[in-house]
Image: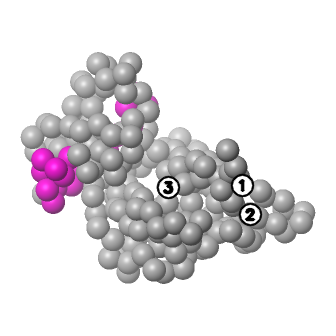
């Protein structure tokens, strides 16, 4: 799948519960997906509990955990989705276990593909 | 049902000492009403095990052997 750059950051579009959402490809996030609460409410995701995360600035935060179905590399999978008060969406490294990621800013090129074993 | 994060943290502290050597990196789903916990490879794995016993409940998810369950580098 091809991505693009937005304000200098790599972004990929994901289908989350049928809605196309641009997610920042965040290699510093060790979860699957993080979405703003308003989007989570619009998608009417099922809440499964709460968890916690640490930000790069060292702040500990509590987050609500939801589950949702996404289409990723032509496969429909169910993943945990964290909530945030921030207004951008993240795709994290847990999503890319079996992937090759190419980010070439100077060529305006972002690509995520299944890695060949 | 109200999730009591402080109670979950206290229980997690108690159980993580004995669990860390065997389950480091795995996810535990804690039911704060009963003190029960369920270990899985991921949140959804732990959640599926937990809801087999407690359907429709919500849980506190923690990563065994780590201070934080998630790290979010961009926020």
Asked which colour scheme the image uses, the reply is one colour
Are labels 2 and 1 on one chain?
Answer: yes
Looking at the image, residue A10 sits to the left or right of residue A33; the answer is right
- What percent of the width, then of the height, locates residue B6? 23, 40
SS at mark 3? loop
Boundaries of the magenta span: B50-67
Q: Is residue A61 above or below residue A3?
A: above
> In which quarter of the view is residue A46 placed?
bottom left
The quadrant holding residue A111 is bottom right
Q: Chain of mark 3?
A: A
Q: Which residue is mark 3?
A: A32
Residue B22 magenta? no
The Cα–Cα distance between marks 2 and 3, rounded to whole angstroms, is 17 Å
Q: Residue furthest front?
A: A117
Q: Earlier in the sequence, mark 2 or mark 1?
A: 1
In percent of width and height, residue A49 lies at 27, 55
Mark 3 Cα shell of 10 Å, populated few (<14), some (14-19), many (≥20): some
Q: Residue at x 39, y 40 (%)?
A: B41
Q: Nearer the viewer, residue B6 or B15?
A: B15
B32 relative to B73 in the view: left or right: left
Q: Position of residue B47 (x, y in %)?
A: 27, 50
Disc 1: which residue: A101
**Do residues under tags 1 and 3 come within 8 Å of each other at their CB atoms?**
no
Please tell me which residue is depicted at 27% across the width and 58% down the height of the picture.
Answer: A48
Specify whether disc 2 shares its chain with disc 3: yes
User: Outermost residue toward the left?
Assistant: B34
């Amino acid at each position: 799948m091809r991505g693009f750059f937005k304000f200098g950051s790599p972004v990929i579009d994901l289908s989350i519960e049928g809605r196309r959402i641009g997610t920042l490809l965040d290699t510093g996030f060790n979860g699957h997906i993080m979405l703003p609460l308003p989007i989570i409410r619009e998608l009417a995701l099922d809440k499964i509990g709460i968890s916690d995360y640490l930000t790069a600035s060292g702040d500990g935060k509590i987050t609500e955990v939801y589950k949702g179905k996404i289409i990723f590399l032509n496969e429909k999978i169910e993943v945990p989705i964290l909530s945030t008060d921030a207004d951008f969406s993240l795709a994290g490294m847990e999503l890319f276990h079996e992937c090759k990621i190419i980010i070439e800013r100077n060529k305006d090129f972002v690509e995520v593909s299944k890695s060949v074993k | 049902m109200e999730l009591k994060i402080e109670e979950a943290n206290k229980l997690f502290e108690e159980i993580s000492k004995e669990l860390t050597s065997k389950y480091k990196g795995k996810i535990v789903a804690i039911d704060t009403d009963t003190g029960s916990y369920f270990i899985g490879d991921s949140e959804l794995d732990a959640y599926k095990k937990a809801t087999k016993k407690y359907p429709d409940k919500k849980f506190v998810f923690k990563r065994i052997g780590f201070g934080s369950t998630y790290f979010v580098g961009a926020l």
